[in-house]
Image: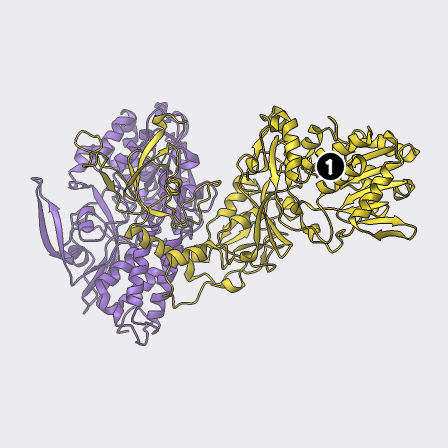
Chain colours: A yellow, B purple
Amino acid sequence: MSEPTDLLNVQIDGIWYQFKKGTRVIEACAQAGKFVPHYCYHPKLSSPGNCRMCLIEMGMPKLGPDRKPALGPDGKPVISWIPRPQISCAQDIAEGMGVRTDSPLTRECRNGVMEFLLINHPLDCPICDQAGECQLQEYSVEFGTAGSRFLEEKVKKPKRVELGPRVTLDDERCILCSRCIRFMKEVAHDDVLGFASRGSHTYLTAHPGKLLDSNYSLNTVDICPVGALTSTDFRFKMRVWFLKETKSICTSCATGCNTIIGTRENVIYRQTPRENNAVNSDWMCDYGRLNFHYVNSAERLKIPQVRDSQGLANVSWRSALAKAGEELKQYQKDGVAVVASAKMTNEELWLAKKLIDSLGTTYHDIVPRFGEADDLLMSADRNPNTLGAQLFGVTGEHPGAKLQEIAESIGSGEIKAVVALGEDLTQIGLTASQLKKLSTLIVVGILPNETTRSASVLLPACAFPEKRGTMINIKGRLQRLNRALQPPGEARDDWEIIRDLIQQLTGSNGIYLIEDVFKQIADTIPEMKGLSFSRIGDTGVQLVDETEEARAAAVTV
Amino acid sequence: MASTTRTPHPREKRIIFKNIDRPGWTNDIECYLHDGGYEELKKAFTMKPEQIVNEVKASGLRGRGGAGFPCGVKWGFIKPGGSKPVYLICNADESEPGTFKDRYIIHQDPHQLLEGMIISCYAVNARLAYIYIRGEFPEGAKILEHALAEAKEQGFLGKNILGSGFDLEIYVFRGAGAYICGEETGLIESMEGKRPYPRIKPPYFPAVLGLYMCPTIVNNVETLCNVKHIVRIGGAEYAKMGKPNNTGTRLLCVSGDVQQPGYYEFEVGGITIGELINDICGGMKPGRTLKAVIPGGSSAKVLNAKDRYKIKAKQPDGTTVELEMGLEDIPIDFDTLAAAGSMAGSGGVIVMDDTRDMVWALNNINEFYAHESCGQCTPCREGSLWMKKITERMLHGGGVEQDTDTLKTVADNIAGRTICAFGEACAWPTQSFIDKFRDEFAATAGKKGSENGSTNH
């Protein structure tokens, strides 16, 4: 807890509160439950104070003749109010400060600013993608007036500007709050945006010859309070109020940015970042954000299949699983290999290890994925759950170290059967003809590839937004995925498929719910003792103190 | 630039303008030295910097750029012994419509400015100073460059100036043509190579976080020239000119409907508006009468000649009396003009006669501010253009009944709610024109427009 000296007394709308020293006035108001409307202010960016929406009345303690605050009948300082309204976004609180967030002057200021912001705004809400999540709409309801006194022609500005490959700009809707400019400069470190011209004719633009093509460009769309910046991918696809929002995490790299998945009628329309200061602040990269379209693919595997003389044929889950069990039972220990994926959840990986143990094979690994790390959010490890795969023994200290041996043993014929969990074996260097040589190839997957086409048993599974489960990110943080969509067709949860495969080999195992799997893990892994899905919460749990290496490899936002 | 050479009026007290239009005077350093130039600099070096600051404080010198902030107090914000360098910037971005005094100093007496600047830099311990001159003054920039080279050659700039141990370099920085660059924090942003968006205060007070986030003093040309004369005669003696809290002399730029517009220098408060117009400027044009005066540059509130002004004045014994006077009886000083509801501002006195259409006049001012609003903060950006559009429509015969009230409330929603004083600068004209000439505005509703400035052309 803070030392008492770190707390300052501030009067907000007549009531005295205590806040930590260094708190912004606007934040103090929020903590006191007094919302102060604002456009340009963003807690993760510098405060330019330009929108003037957060004007409030402010005062400081009146000093008595002894230069000490004069006290009123209630024993509290008497406040001497500053006649001019003050912005609340750029100042820290001070001892004895007074704030009025709902006075006639404050209301008049907000009303005035709203009017100014709307006179040159196109008011094209019916065709604007921001409608429904637009602060201009929201505040005009709360702080504006229904009619307009503006009889003049509006200022004309550029429209449908492709600021970059993923962001479309409508300058007429822009309220010039400069959030996007500041984000690109202060967070993305790619200072490509700026204002041109001046006065009411000012417009946002990329610097001449430059594009807003940063891998973080879509965050500007998130923080744009109006419909000026829209996602070229999402715009015109779906009204935001129809979207069902599911809290989840991004699985495109080991960082595990917290997300909100927007879906409607079992279709995913967008992913947006969700604040988690231990992971991704308020941001996520464009690559991860847009890496979901395959989930909606018409090619998704929907029905279990078993190979007969004619090729792959649709069968029931019962037959497919029975067939898989029957085939796997034929092999001695190292005659079978398990190639798993670090894109799998902890629960899936835990069960995958159980499967490996049931088969008794030493040939098992995951397929590593590496790229360039940036200095922001993206990890070099593009698999989201490498730590989980290591923790449960699906892979070793060096993920992928066994893959070459597995590939060679398949080539030599020593390995006759492979269980491929969510990975395409051509990724580890095997050719289609080598895959065809396998007597048994059990494939759990979501989209067709060379491996699924060579399968003897093909079991359709879930993509990440269709799953519940947990993952451990590069910093050792346990986080939760939530189901935003139902899987297509007859596709099943991966953990259920693996559980059923184990059952085929060993008989009933008493696991009926994914919570049962997590309980097994929590009972076994000391760092996870006592945890449950609900205890992990929306923002995860740090399992181990961050190591130096993890910190070095991890994100800095 | 062609200047209207004119002998100073006997009532003038020319100190800063002593050499302006002086027969035989040239702007080179020989002429300046021959006339005793840079002697005050030598005197300054015999004083300690804090002594000079104290003299300036004692002089009561108030800033001549428009705000009238006490110069010594401003300098006092610079704490000696700080770890960061101190910068001094001469604000030569003279852009306020109706104001044309600094350009004459720069053109005809640049060394007076340089001497004042060097002394000021010594006083606040600035080792690097800039003259920020507006882009529209290319000739002035050239003259200053030349004067700086001359001063350097004579050892008044550079290392160990006149053996004092004090080093100083001064550079000319040319603006790119924006009124907002005259706002000191906008000016600083501009010098840093950015858009001249004024900074929010707090925390960015120039004396604390100025140029490159270092303590910075920004003073107007005329203000800095005054420093030389304060050193010459001493702060106490200087304070005897003018009146208490309104000391020294003031350069006035008279424009508009008078017989002899031009620039003049008087003791502060030493002349009334009526005397200025009638005795100094040759009176109104034949057959015309005074209608209105904007006393301190276009952003100052307009004063109606028909009104009576109640002015609280401090008596020598400390008591206050309320005096009632007509417009022509108002003495031109900081406090009286403020009490009359306007300001001394930048010294630009704009005189309008009975033929002037007030809607036209306000629209003229509104056009300027709508064009010059930097656009950073909402009220000024949107409000300045809105006001201009309304007055323009009124002028062209499209006035409607609610225009007057709309104009007034738009202006009210700007003043006091913006990042910098431009908000007031663009709102005050509208507020005051409507306050003082409401009938004229109301009368435009449903009327055919007049596009020129006077109704009897």
Q: Please give the name of the residue rendered at 88% of the width and 44% of the height, measured from the top-left corner.
A: A432
**Quadrant where the C terminus of chain A lies?**
top right
The spot of residue A284 in percent (x, y) is: 59, 42
Quadrant in the rendering for residue B199: top left
Q: How many marks?
A: 1
Quadrant in the rendering for residue A344: top right
Q: Nearer the viewer, residue A381 or A201?
A: A381
Question: In the rendered image, is residue A371 in sight?
Answer: no
State the SS at label 1.
Answer: loop
Which residue is under mark 1?
A369
**Quadrant where the N terminus of chain A lies?**
top left
Q: Residues within 10 Å of mark 1 (few under 14, many from 20)?
A: some
**In the image, what residue type sits under mark 1?**
Arg
Q: Nearer the viewer, residue A212 or A198?
A: A212
Residue B65 lies left or right of residue A256; in this view the side is left
Q: Nearer the viewer, residue A51 or A348?
A: A348
The spot of residue A338 in percent (x, y) is: 80, 35
The spot of residue B294 in percent (x, y) is: 24, 57
Q: Is residue A509 above or below residue B138?
A: above
Question: In the rendered image, is residue A36 in sight?
Answer: yes
The spot of residue B235 in percent (x, y) is: 20, 33
Q: Label 1 marks which chain's residue?
A: A
Q: Is residue A390 above or below residue A249?
A: above
Quadrant in the rendering for residue A457: top right
Residue A21 lies left or right of residue A177; in this view the side is left
Q: Please give the name of the residue rendered at 79% of the width and 36% of the height, measured from the top-left corner.
A: A339
